């Protein structure tokens, strides 16, 4: 019986805090994306601008986000019934955008005009009991072009 | 060439559906799935569990694990009451019941595979009247009459197999725990049905023997005192809440037009004395 009460409390806590953290994070992401839109990040492998006065340097942004109890529970149920794991979709969406933002913030410090050849790497860390994923890491990196 | 990043619209990579909606649909789905699978299998198993010959129960490996070493010979009074109650049941010939008495403070009595009924001193001394004691004995005999021990054992095996199969596919500990709880709750539903059935038969036997069912109410009162004000969810309990057992009893008493004297027979002094000595014996050995 106490197990059940603990379970419900954990779900409620996971849902409450998870929702709050997510909406706060999205607000911050949208705001910063607008600010950093002046530095385009493109996937092309060849430097798009060739000017003598430009230097290049590696910039990277890394983020680790943990999933909450509620998300993990929903994802576990999805393992049985199938379908879109929506609880992980927002998680990865946030992580990727945040990683790119952190990379762009690095580029901004260099006064970069553009970041090219950006790449994203995703990995799950902390595989818990039953191989359930505890948190995701996203690394974004690219080459910043900045005036010398 | 000019490079720029467009502002992407929100919500293209995520779902707009409220997470709670998904939560309720999926949770209801998993609860229903486990409940339906286990209930169906239990109902199927019930069709043949009670066809297992009674003699075989004693040969099951589980039965031999339960040792009755602590059990002692029944005192004459217990012998008399158990015999009286047993006779009122008119059990089929192949069902043989063995009573065991254990000198221990545990407030309990149980019936198990092979027709063994174990009575603890702790429960016997909490009761004050023959009718209450008869209720306990009759309840346990009814369990054996309906082959509840072998059926419960079969239910346990079914639930075990289903949950193991489901858990190994889910691969998520939270979901596994939830499925385990749902499985237990389903199992407990059947266990409580057994208790109601045994209560019903025991009350009928009391009415047959003593003309009234006060003994049942007396016994449940003792349970109420024992449990105090503990918070309990019935859906996770092996036994129905005492309140619900009392209401079934009251319904049955009201349906019984035979209104004789409702005075109960107190334990004879010699038996009270014997219980006292038994208690002193355990206290000493501690």
Image (cartoon, helix red, strand yellow):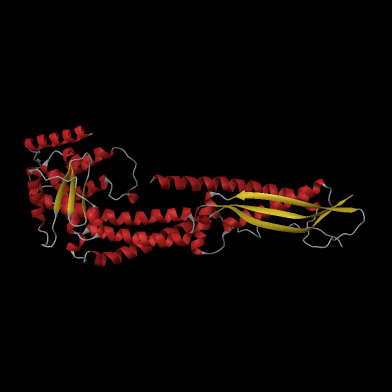
Image side of residue B97 versus residue A92, left or right: left
Name the residue: 67% across, 48% down: A27
Rendering coords of residue B193 (x, y %): 26, 55
Rendering coords of residue A142 (x, y %): 77, 55
Q: How many tags in the picture?
A: 0
Between residue B72 and residue B25, name the one nearer to us: B72
Image side of residue A88 versus residue B175, left or right: right
Residue most toward the right?
Answer: A52
Name the residue: 8% across, 40% down: B265
Rendering coords of residue B152 (x, y %): 27, 58
User: Is any atom of residue A85 visible in this view?
Assistant: yes
Name the residue: 54% across, 48% down: A15
Between residue B148 and residue B240, name the one nearer to us: B148
Image side of residue B166 versus residue B111, left or right: right
Name the residue: 47% across, 45% down: A9
Image side of residue B85 versus residue B238, left or right: left
Between residue B104 and residue B142, name the one nearer to us: B104
Rendering coords of residue B278 (x, y %): 15, 36
User: Is any atom of residue B8 visible in this view?
Assistant: no
Between residue B241 and residue A132, name the one nearer to us: A132
Image: A98 above or below A81: above
């Amino acid at each position: 019986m106490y197990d059940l009460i603990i379970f419900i409390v954990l779900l409620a806590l996971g849902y409450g805090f998870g929702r709050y953290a997510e909406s706060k994070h999205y607000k911050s992401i949208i705001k910063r994306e607008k600010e950093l839109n002046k530095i385009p990040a493109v996937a092309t492998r060849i430097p798009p601008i060739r000017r003598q006065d430009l230097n290049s340097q590696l910039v990277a942004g890394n983020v680790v986000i943990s999933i909450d109890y509620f998300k993990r529970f929903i994802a576990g149920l999805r393992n049985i019934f199938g379908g879109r794991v929506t609880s992980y979709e927002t998680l990865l969406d946030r992580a990727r955008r945040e990683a790119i933002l952190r990379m762009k913030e690095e580029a901004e410090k260099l006064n970069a005009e553009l970041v090219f050849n950006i790449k994203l790497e995703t990995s799950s860390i902390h595989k818990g009991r039953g191989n359930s994923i505890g948190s995701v890491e996203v690394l974004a990196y690219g080459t910043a072009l900045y005036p010398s | 060439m000019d490079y720029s990043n467009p502002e992407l619209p929100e919500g293209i990579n995520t779902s707009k559906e409220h997470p709670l909606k998904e939560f309720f649909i999926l949770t209801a789905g998993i609860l229903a799935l486990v409940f339906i699978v286990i209930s169906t299998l239990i109902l199927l198993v019930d069709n043949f569990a009670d066809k297992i010959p009674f003699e075989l129960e004693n040969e099951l490996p589980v039965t031999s694990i339960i040792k009755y070493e602590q059990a002692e010979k029944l005192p004459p009074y217990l012998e008399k009451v158990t015999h009286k109650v047993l006779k009122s049941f008119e059990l089929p010939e192949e069902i043989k019941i063995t009573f065991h008495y254990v000198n221990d403070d545990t407030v309990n009595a149980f019936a198990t595979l092979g027709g063994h009924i174990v009575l603890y001193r702790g429960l016997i001394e909490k009761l004050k009247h023959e009718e209450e004691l008869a209720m306990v004995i009759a309840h346990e005999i009814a369990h054996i009459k309906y082959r509840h021990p072998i059926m419960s054992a079969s239910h346990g095996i079914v639930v075990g197999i289903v949950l193991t199969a489901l858990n190994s596919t889910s691969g998520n500990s939270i979901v596994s725990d939830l499925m385990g709880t749902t499985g237990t709750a389903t199992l407990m539903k059947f266990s409580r049905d057994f208790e109601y059935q045994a209560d019903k038969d025991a009350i009928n036997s009391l009415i047959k023997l003593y003309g009234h069912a006060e003994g049942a109410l007396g016994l449940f009162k003792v349970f109420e005192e024992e449990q105090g004000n503990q918070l309990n969810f019935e859906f996770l309990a092996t036994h129905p809440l005492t309140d619900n057992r009392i209401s079934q009893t009251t319904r049955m008493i009201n349906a019984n037009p035979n209104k004789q004297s409702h005075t109960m027979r107190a334990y004879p002094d010699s038996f009270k004395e014997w219980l006292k000595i038994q208690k002193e014996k355990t206290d000493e050995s501690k």
